[in-house]
Image (cartoon, helix red, strand yellow):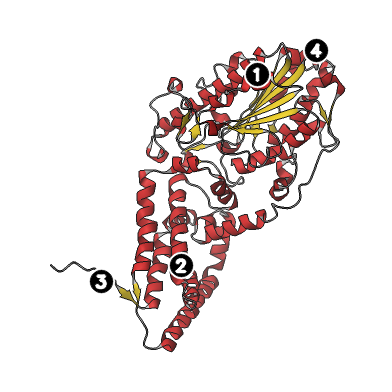
Amino acid sequence: MRMLHLRRPALSRLLFIYLFTLIIALGLNIAFYRQAFTLLPVNTLHNWLVFLSMPLVAFSVINIVLCLASFIRLDRLVITLFVLVSAAAQYFISTFGIIIDRSMITNILDTTAAESFALMSTNMVLTLLFTALLPVIVAWWIKIKPSRSALRTISLRIASVVISALIIVAVALLFYKDYASLFRNNKELVKSLSPSNSIAASLSWYSHNRMDNLPLVKIGEDAHQRPEMQNGPRKNLTILVLGETSRAADFSLGGYARETNPLLKQDNVVYFPNTTSCGTATAVSVPCMFSGMTRAHYDDQLAHHQEGLLDIIQRAGIQVQWNENDGGCKGVCDRVPHKDMTQLNLADYCIKGECQDEILFHDLASDIDKLQGDGLIVLHTIGSHGPTYYNRYPPQFRKFTPTCDTNEIQTCSQQQLVNTYDNTILYVDYIVDKAIKLLQSKQDKFTTSLVYLSDHGESLGENGVYLHGLPYSIAPETQKHVPLLIWLSEDYQKRYAINNQCLQKNAREKQVSQDNLFPTMLGLLGVSTKEYRAEDDILTPCREQAK
């Protein structure tokens, strides 16, 4: 019996290049053309010509790159790279409305295995199978016809490069003003064009991170704790709850119609409804808020090799502990004691490598009892991290229904998605309240206080945008408007003369941001240093009134 034998198709090298240039320039840039079609807008003959010139330019640029790569027989490898990054970029742009830039590359590199798994879906697998894997297989299956005349094939490829360059020049001459206006007024549009978006973002990430291994820059070397913090019957203990992806828009403490903060409303917390973040992703916001630099002057390169808030507090003689449940502290806890709670993998709290935030309290009470002096404990929560919002809370917190119990959040109705997200906020309310109750149970030994601040917000399908991480300049308010609250025990208010009414009034009326965390934590813990900015300490005006 003769076996069926599939013959490998054969193409000339130039036709091979044209085929995959067409696939990349057209098939893997549909998301870009959709955006460009809307933004032009295409409503006149002239704008139609401008729009139709875009795939022509994209084809010409990619053709030049592949032709040049073919001279050193790297065209298949370059095609493979271009197809993989373009297909992946198009999927995430189309599905979640993200933008491929340096911060997104940082997010990708900082993503844990569990977070990556949470993004996996049938739709994602099938899409990438047909748009990425299949074209790559075809690219390596096709045979390149041997040429009878090397000179002729080289000449044809050189001619192809020249013609492509002339097309680019011609389009520039005809439509330069249109292109300049479109991309100047819509600066993020070019970040949807593949594969240039991924290449440019990766190069930008490299240039910003190549200095990471520079010597550590010390700050606050003069740090010491003020005497009044040490002269008292009790030690001081503060818990800083670092939230994840909790947006202020869904906190009933700030006026949200749904009751998502029933427990905290009973805790006499001071809630700051007008708080903005430093960034729209954990990898930006967390280093920024702990760095001591304001958002306007934040230098991420410097932050990577400079001490921050926790170093100063520890230097002042206060014991610091960081409990981690969100994939890492982004460098801010590297020089203080820290625990990765996910490594416990407790069945009651953990699902596929990710744990619900109650795991942060495992052995926490005994850790507090072991403190020999004043202490700061940071609880880094996974909070409302998507897309698997439904995994963030136990079944008893499934109050708002129906829910979106899938990682393919774009397939759910917005109401289902909001219901699920609001359930995560209800669980955040429980976690922060539990931390307050733990502090209250230790008031015989400690003067206690708590701060809660989320790193950034979240988009829940508004205007077709999901998750977070958009560039700050164009990110919606839901990604930048974050919840902040402070709880001070009565003992703290009396011992350190804090006027609670003043604090409540200022919280309602004043604009604050993550810039205020650094000085406020130093002031709250009584740390004196030249790095402390009293004017940015939220408690400062209310100390003065109390006095």
The amino acid marked with disc number 2 is Leu
Snapshot quadrant of residue 130: bottom left
Q: Which mark is residue 77?
A: 2
Horizontal side, residue 369 vs residue 405: left or right: right
Cβ atoms under marks 4 and 2 closer than 8 Å: no
Q: Earlier in the sequence, mark 2 or mark 1?
A: 2
Q: Earlier in the sequence, mark 3 or mark 2?
A: 3
Give the CA distance from mark 3 to mark 4: 87 Å
Q: Amino acid at mark 4?
A: Pro
Classify residue 297 by image quadrant: top right
Q: Which mark is residue 7?
A: 3
Residue at (39, 53) in percent of width and height: 128
Q: Secondary structure at mark 1?
A: loop
Q: Residue at 80%, 33% (x, y): give it.
A: 315
- Which residue in the structure is indicated by mark 4? 233
Q: Position of residue 58 (x, y in %)?
A: 47, 66
Q: Secondary structure at mark 2?
A: helix
Q: How far from the left and from the top, in percent, is residue 64?
A: 49, 73
Q: Is residue 508 above or below residue 157?
A: above
